[in-house]
Amino acid sequence: MTHPIARTQEEWTQALSARGERAFVAKQVFGWIQKRGVLDPARMSNLSAKVREALVAEGVGEILTTENVHRSADGTKKAVLRLHDGATIETVLLPSVSGRGSAAAEELDADSAAAEDDDEDEEAEPIAPGVVRVTQCISTQVGCAMGCVFCASGVAGLKRHLGAEEIVAQVLVGRAMLEGTEQLRNVVFMGMGEPLHNYDATARAVRLLTHPEGIGLSSRRVTVSTSGLVPEIERLGKEFAGQVALAVSLHAADDATRSAMMPINRKYPIAELMAALRDYPMPKRRRITIEYTLVAGKNDSPEHAHRLAALLRGLRVKVNLIPMNPISASDLGPTQHGRVLAFQSVMTDAGYSCFVRRRRGDDVAAACGQLALLGAKPKVKGFRKAEEA
Ligand code: SAH
Ligand code: SF4
């Protein structure tokens, strides 16, 4: 059942009209929750006492508490959030400098998140100088069932799915953490968990985040990242008509290499995944983001790069290379910088937009793949290595 905090405005209208309330009350309630991020009915000051009591009876209230905020030296912030059942999840805020034309801004653009803007979006929507654009990375599950060998969430296994209300509440908390001239601009489903394994909650969260009366993010600035669940990619494409950005964690261009890194590849091998990407409905000038985590000695040779270039031929993609962030559960490690650049040159020479994502937030274990299950075992102070906690 949908938690009331994850109700759409239309669902609020239904629920409250059943209690004899008028439609504008539903609009007010939706606005308090989704626009202002107020979850405690006692603080919804323009509602009648009767409505506030009804909301409490329905279960509206705080659903997570911020346990800790860790600040990285590079400006990345990681919030550790505790859920009602004691489980913890993490969300990461990645600020980047705005303003086009400067080399620094371009560099940050390229590595702040897999889903950074397509160029034409920037032209259509100039940002005032001085504004700091923030990308928020959110989790969709406690742990993950996919078992990718290089990922702390995967090594941990799946504890449970998050509800849409828990996914959206991360963004409400994230927004409240913005400072100074920061603006929340992108939300990427790249935290802990496989969003498409938790399809319904993910899809509802996307609808809520992009609702014009709520947080109101542009759908092209909401990116769902997947390890390649083919039927759900097709479903997402159909249900949103391509109006949600897609990132695909590919990591290898041949089945043997990919299956050794990502067990899901045995279920949905590369040919099926590519067919789904070719069919994904794409608005003009949009591209699918291909994520490629470079793991030393596994998928990072020039031959691997040539294979990738050949595989992606004809697809509208941009490629993000992510040198693997070390995790304590594995001896696998990052590709050395020279080889990363060599891999990138093969891709750019083949005509692809290909960026290297700088490692961010790893001093607070907030970098890709380092978000791990906390809570069950004793915590390590400072979360220097959260996956050990
Ligand atoms: N489950 C989804 C989204 C969460 S993972 C997916 O796999 O796409 C987000 C990204 O982080 C993925 O591209 C994933 O491959 C990458 N990642 C996981 N572990 C990593 C690590 N140790 N170092 C670098 N990137 C990693
Ligand atoms: Fe799950 Fe993504 Fe990690 Fe793979 S990389 S285990 S799909 S969170």
Image (cartoon, rainbow, N blue to C red):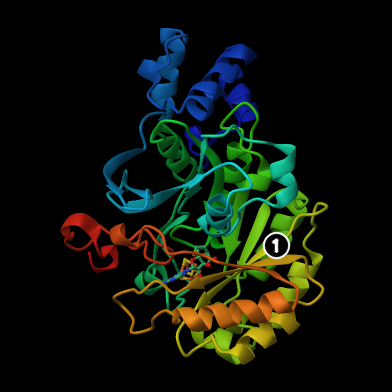
Q: Residue at x 45, y 54 (%)?
A: 139
Question: Where does the image place residue 208, in percent across and percent down from the top left?
Answer: 59, 37
Q: Is residue 272 visible?
A: no
Q: Which residue is identified by label 1? A: 288
Quarter-wise, where is residue 170 in the image? Answer: top left
Residue drawn at 77 percent across, 62 percent down:
280
Residue 75 lies left or right of residue 97; in this view the side is left
Residue 129 sits above or below residue 43 on the image? below
Task: Residue 228: give x, y in percent of width and height.
Answer: 62, 70
Q: Please state which amino acid type lies under the numbered disc 1.
A: Ile
- Callout 1: 10 Å neighbours few (<14), some, many (20+)? many
Q: Residue at x 33, y 84 (%)?
A: 331
Figure check: 23 above or below 259: above
Numbered disc 1: secondary structure = strand
Q: Is residue 294 above or below residue 32?
A: below
The answer to whether the residue bearing label 1 lies less than 8 angstroms from the nearest atom of ligand 1 is no
Between 290 and 145, the one lying in front of the other is 290
In the visual, does 376 lie left or right of 230? left
Residue 128's spot in the image, x, y percent? Answer: 59, 32
Give the residue at x 50% y 58%: 190
